[in-house]
Amino acid sequence: MSDGERGAAAGEGLSDASRYEQGMSVRRAVLSDAHVDRANAQTTAFTADFQDFITRTAWGDIWSRPGLDRRSRSIAVLTALIAHGHETELAMHVRAARTNGLTVEEITEVILQAGLYCGVPAANSAFVVAQRVLEELGDL
């Protein structure tokens, strides 16, 4: 992929409105309409700019890039969230990982791998969160 293609893939040349629409489409596909609708319903004047930012940047720019498929992005996100102890976001992204095609066994492997590099306490917490979410989804 050339630099021009890479930049265009990341949303270069798109208006903020186009990046927002692209981001909202990907956000809904990965997290679900129900999740995004709940987040939008909780948006206030104080949080509106942040919601716009994550929709355009995280979802419209990064998650929309062609360099990794959504399964691979989910693996990377799960690992990063485990490493930093972001359990609320981890729960949301365990659901997203299932939507993106990761199996329960693959999620287990991601947590085990993260435990090796991020620490046993991080993996222990991640297993608690993932088990709760996977039980809620009826996968366990």
Image (cartoon, helix red, strand yellow):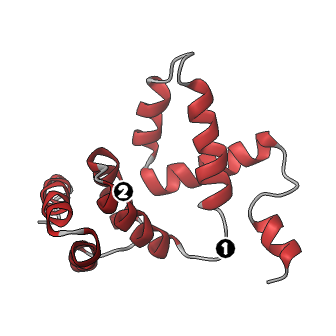
Split into 4 quadrants, where in the image is the N terminus? bottom right
Q: Mark 1 points at which residue?
A: 66
Q: In the image, is 134 to the left or to the right of 43?
A: left
Tell me the tag on residue 52.
Answer: none
Seen from the viewer's position, the closer of residues 10 and 17 is 10
Q: In this view, does 135 lie above or below 109?
A: above
Q: Residue at x 21, y 69 (%)?
A: 119
Q: In the image, is 53 to the left or to the right of 17?
A: left
Within 10 Å of disc 2 (Cα), the crowding (few <14, some 14-19, many 20+) is: many
**Residue 67 screen position, x and y as percent:** 64, 77
Label 2 and label 1: CA atoms lie apart by 20 Å
**Residue 28 screen position, x and y as percent:** 51, 49
Q: What element carries label 1?
A: loop
Q: Name the residue under label 2.
A: 93
**Residue 86 screen position, x and y as percent:** 31, 49
Mark 2 belongs to which amino acid? Answer: His
Q: Is mark 2 on a helix, strand or loop?
A: helix
Q: In this view, does 41 lie above or below 136?
A: above
Mark 1 belongs to which amino acid? Answer: Pro
